[in-house]
Image (cartoon, coloured by chain):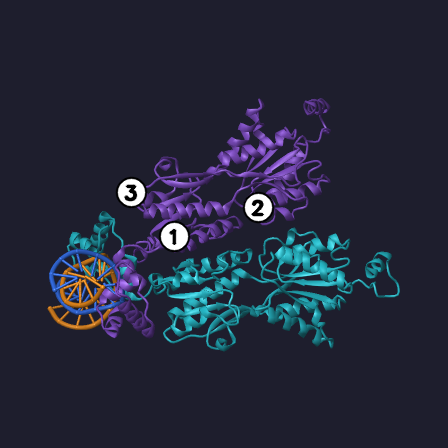
Chain colours: A purple, B cyan, C blue, D orange
Amino acid sequence: MANMSDVAKAAGVSKSTVSNVFSGKRAISEAVRMRVLAAAEQLNYRPNYFARSMVTKETRIIGVVMDSEKVKFSQYNISFFNGVLKECNRQGYRLLIDTLHKEYRKQVTQMTSEPVDGEIILDPARVDERIQERVANGRVMTIIGKPPLKYETALSYVNNDNVQAAETATAYLLGLGHRHILLMNAVKKRTVSQDRKAGYVQAFEKIGLTANENCNVYRGETVSSVEYGYITAKKYLRKNPMITAIIADTDQIALGVYRAVSELGLSVPGDVSVIAFNNNTVYPDEFNPPLTCIELNGEILGQEATKLLIEQLQSKEKLVKQIIIQSKLVERASCGPARTIFPSDPVQSSTLVQREDK
Amino acid sequence: MANMSDVAKAAGVSKSTVSNVFSGKRAISEAVRMRVLAAAEQLNYRPNYFARSMVTKETRIIGVVMDSEKVKFSQYNISFFNGVLKECNRQGYRLLIDTLHKEYRKQVTQMTSEPVDGEIILDPARVDERIQERVANGRVMTIIGKPPLKYETALSYVNNDNVQAAETATAYLLGLGHRHILLMNAVKKRTVSQDRKAGYVQAFEKIGLTANENCNVYRGETVSSVEYGYITAKKYLRKNPMITAIIADTDQIALGVYRAVSELGLSVPGDVSVIAFNNNTVYPDEFNPPLTCIELNGEILGQEATKLLIEQLQSKEKLVKQIIIQSKLVERASCGPARTIFPSDPVQSSTLVQREDK
DNA sequence: CTGTTAGCGCTTTCAG
DNA sequence: CTGAAAGCGCTAACAG
């Protein structure tokens, strides 16, 4: 492949003139410009990415760091990536997905600087080595979700308002008269599940009630989403027939819930109302009945994070900014008024009837 | 950030010794090695990715080139990317997703070499500028799907055996007694739709029948998958009540078909059997009834393509290899024997007569 | 086993 | 507006 000197020679100019034609950093007379471009064209020349990066110290590549244990795109990630890609595309950045495992990169021969200007970190944990290491090296990054507590004010992040989301869902169900609401939460160690629980509890408190501690279930690591929904719903609905509503962490989980409800001879929303945090935005309309959701817009999350990261990259001073994204309720047909006849508690049901009268 | 000279100085050795400690290309005595590593550790040094790449002419990054118009991950892409990532992870490569638009990179200031060793090209078209350009520049690549005809023997590719897949689906339905089978095909300009049609026709021929040309519909570019399924199924089932089976290009399309069938007061599989090429592997079990599919394993496709690409990168001679992946039928509950009562038969149900009258 | 030297292809002063 | 020269941080011969 031809290099800059070849082009300079062919066009009868100096290297730096060629450089400036391609970088646009200095004005070059139109005549010379054309001559250079023609020579380049003919030699099929294009500037070497690395040579340029080496001196400018800029790559125009941003990295996405996923949990290296999992190395998996989930349904949830798709719309997120679409948002990231969209913004990258707009601003002329490339996207590097880096999933090399830890042990791999600890090998001496694999240690290198990262070929990126900045990074988006996914799935932060309470104690997160990846983040610690990057902070220590002064790398620029944006976190998706809440960063570890000790960095909460020091790092930029983009997060859904998970407390608000859970509160909205819960309040909506409370408004429909439900009092025994099962929260099928995320995995316990993720910060999001704490937030969800907080929102849930808060919604009860706001109307002067106390949430039932036993109605918050955390997801185990092992089962699939659909399975988790199915097994858990079946178990809890059997154990506690007072439950008239279920909040599912994802729409896939809700799918399992639907199946459990139907197998128990019950119906949605007649007997059990179902609402989910909607992580993929593809299918809720295809549920039968269509699934009411708290819309978590992954694409916006991805796009905002990318914008923020690039903003940090281009700002001269250190820039720290947190963006919290509110989510909204999308009503479809899976929630209805709480049923008022309960198998085991005539008193309770009359209370509820009274309440409805208000 | 410290550089190699700093480390060399600190450790009291030469630059090349440091280089060899990190590259592992030459044996270094353990004593010196430790000294170097300690110095590096203390200076928080790691080799500069670009400087290294510049001289080795190797990046250990592979690129995925998606249709820049679309800049969207679809359901279909997920499992594919999981396969790619898995293999990248195994072999120590990074993945660059490049979706910059054409006009963007035509700007002089945006022209650069690509920072990748090789690329995987998605969604090849019959005439594909991206491929032509890369061939002209001698870049190494692996195509997913069939490359343009003129390159078919010259380029490496990984493809599903789409002819076989369509034939399998069609033969299965023929075996159930169906004779009027609607093929809801992919977009016409994609090579895959030709293959599907060929397999479809072939299955009829193998049992001495001739496929009805009018039963092959191509998808338009504009509508969503679900919509395409819905609108097309509704239209054709109305127009031609002889149709007892539908082959859908994707399971999302099948979702639309289900809805159309149900709105027409018909049932799956009682009146209409449905089978789909399964592009996402997530939902077929959740259909009601569960959707019979030709399983296209995107993850295997991605993994094989990555393996092949890296193999080409590492081979000294030019390596061209084609990998064809067979797919298999997964029977669920959406196909049944063809119904035997047709509107045009002497014995007709009143509803059907009515419809014909319109 | 270690050190010296010459690039890789570009950008960036600094003079003209 | 253009050119010459000095690096960026590393690897790869080639000597020792």
Helix, strand or loop at disc 3? loop
Please tell me whether mark 2 sits on a helix, a strand or a loop.
helix
Q: Is residue B119 toward the left or the right of residue A140 in the image?
A: right
**For mark 2, what is the residue?**
A225
Q: Residue at x 52, y 44 (%)?
A: A297
Question: The residue under label 2 is which amino acid type?
Answer: Ser
| Residue in front for this viewpoint, A46 or B325 | A46
Say which amino acid is labelled 3. Glu
Asked whether the residues under the numbered discs 1 and 3 touch, taking CB atoms below 8 Å apart as contact, a structural biologist would say: no
Q: Are marks 1 and 3 on the same chain?
A: yes
> Image check: A304 left or right of A296?
left
Question: Callout 1: few (<14), some (14-19), or many (20+) C-alpha neighbours within 10 Å?
Answer: many
Within 10 angstroms of label 2, few (less than 14), some, or many (20 or more) residues?
some
Query: In the figure, B220 relative to B283: above or below?
Result: below
Residue B47 seen from this side: no
Amino acid type for the residue under numbered disc 1: Gly
Nearer the observer: mark 2 or 1; the answer is 1
Label 1 marks which chain's residue?
A
Q: Quadrant of residue B27?
A: bottom left
Q: Which is in the foreground here, disc 1 or disc 3?
A: 3
Query: How far is the residue under mark 2 from the one under mark 1?
Result: 28 Å
